[in-house]
Amino acid sequence: MNCKRIELVSTWWKITPRKKGFTLPFGFHSGHLKLQRKSFLLKEGEKNKEKERHWPSSDQKVDHMLKMALGHSETNEVLKNAAEQEHALGDNGTSGSRMMDQGLSALLTEYGKHVEEMKQQLQLYQAQMAEMTLKLEEVTNENERLHAELKEPLEKQLEALPLIHLETDIPADEGIVKTLQEQLQLEKKDQLTSFQQLTRQLHVAKEKIELTNQQFLKTVTEQDVELEKLRKQLRQAKIDGQVANAKLEEIMALKEKLHSQLERKEEDRISAQERETASDKRLQQMQSGIKQLEMRLCVTVQGAERLRAEKVALEEQIRELQAKSASLESEKYDAVAKVQDCIQLLEEANLLKSQALFGEKQKEEEIKKLQDEMSQLAENTAARIRKEVDTAKRQCNMQVSRLTEEVSALQMECGEKQSQIERAIREKRAVEEELEKVYREHREHEPDSRKLEQLHQKYLLAEAAKDDLQRNLQVTQNKLKQLEMNSEEVKSRCQEVICKLQSTLDSEREKSAFVSEQRLKFQQENEQLQNEMEGLRKLAVEAQQKAKIKISTMEHEHAVKEHGYEVRLKEMEDTSRKSTAELRRLLVAQQKATNRWKEETKNLTDTTESMISKLKSELRRQKLRSQELISQLEIANEKVAEDETTMMEYREYIDRLQRRLSQAEQRAATASQQVPSSSKVLSKHMEHAEVLTFTSFLRQR
């Protein structure tokens, strides 16, 4: 401001119109003008300093406003770029938010760098302003010093001037001085009015700039607050999304676990059902096998008793027949030829008998084996009833079915054989009676042809009976062979059981010597078997009851578990439905919130873009204004430089004048000593000449 005022004064000094014959009054030194100029400058500088105390300098305010405008323009550009990135990446979920955060971080770093650069520029401008203020202070100090230095000699010179000449010259120069003073006052008033107008305009411009800056700062702060809110909302939304994803993962894991548990429980239930069905089947098979074994035992015991009775009867009959045949052979030598056939028949009958005995023995052995097997089975079933239920059931079922068939077949064959043996016994009795009759007739020695014929007929009948018996024997032999084949098959089938029961067979073989003891033992064994069967029945009944109780408990537990699992399933389904509904609601709310945020961001971006456009337009106007002010400042600086050059020239000229004055004073002093009267005239002429030279110099300038 001081530079501007100095420039204005210098321009006023240059622009003031002067007459061609303009001459300063005698004794009015050119230093007066310079002193007036300096005093005016000093007064204006003091006034401006007082004003600057109340409000800051316009240069500082302009710098501050430029700084704020540049900073806000940069912030607006950053916000605009961020909004564009957010709008471009708004549809891409979490990846868009990450890209937006990265873009914002990059823009914030660039903004920080730019702010640091602007701060450095501000520091440079502040340093330059400080240097300029120091220079201005130096210039003002030099002006004051020069004013003080010039004031003293001028006062001395004015005091030394004669009063008479001044009085004569005053009326001539008063008009010029008054005109000059009026012109100076007018110029001062014009300059003051122009300066006041300029200051008013500057104040108005500064107030406008401050208002715009305040509005801009408010908008920027509001946008920053909104951006922070949006960032917080985005972070909260991200956190909510992560929490929702974690909840979804937990729910899915729980669902999978529950599905796996349900599958396991279903598998356990199916396996339990299969086990129950298998146990039921095994129990049924065991019961049926036990019943079949009981039936088989009863049948085999009955068959053994029958066979034993038949065996005893046959043995007695054979003994009787042997005795009779021996007596007949010894007594009846004559009837040997006739009876040879009968003897052969008897031998064949003996063979059949031996074969029957052998078969009976085999049957007895088989019966014993079966009894031993049954006893061994009864003993082993108690110990191995739980381990070998399936195998025992199958084997016993097969064996019982086969044995029942065989026993039924044997019973039928035994009945047939008994009928045949009865017929043979009857025929034998008839033959014996006839032989006895023949023997009696032989004793009487009464040949009788009729009797011989009868005997011959009887013999023929006996031969026919013999043929029948032979046929029957063949049939019985075939049947016995079939029985042997069947027994061999039964043996082959029962070999596995026989191996297990070999130990008991040895003990039973030792006891087979005594028939009576065997009978008693058989009876005892039958009783034991019956007792064991009753015990087995009781055990089977107990096992059935236990199995039924276990099955009922298992069914109850299974029903309870099924009910619990169904309740859990329902609860889990309800929880899953509720969780899915909550998740859907949260997703819908999140989508609504995202849409609302997008709309708000769009609105904010639109408002910010409009504000940015307005601020840009204002910035452009302010930039133009600042450019104009800068151009004016440059012009003022150029004028200040020119004024400084003129001041330097004036200083040089003043120094020359001072030298000349000092030389003139020395000459005047020497001349005054010689000629006091002429010295005064010469001094006046010299001063007049100096004034003329000064005015001519000013005109030239």
Image (spheres, helix red, strand yellow):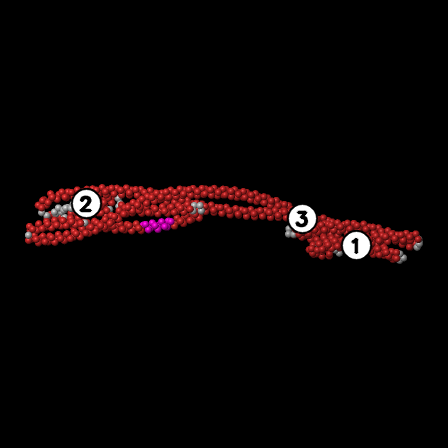
Q: Position of residue 338 (x, y in %)?
A: 88, 56
Tag 1: Cα neighbours inside 10 Å, few (<14), some, or many (≥20)?
A: some
Disc nearer the start of the sequence (2/1): 2
Q: Is residue 595 left or right of residue 524?
A: left
Q: Position of residue 267 (x, y in %)?
A: 58, 48
478 is higher (above) or lower (below) than 587 = below
Tag 2: Cα neighbours inside 10 Å, few (<14), some, or many (≥20)?
A: few
In this view, the mark in front (3 or 1): 1
Disc nearer the start of the sequence (3/1): 3
Q: Decide if residue 398 is in sight here.
A: yes
Q: Amino acid at mark 2?
A: Thr
Q: Amino acid at mark 1?
A: Gln
Question: Which residues fall within the magenta stretch?
Answer: 107-119
Disc nearer the start of the sequence (2/3): 2
Q: Position of residue 77 (x, y in %)?
A: 36, 47
Which residue is the site of mark 3? 285
Q: Amino acid at mark 3?
A: Gln
Task: Give the Cα distance between marks 3 and 1.
Answer: 39 Å
| Main SS, magenta residues | helix
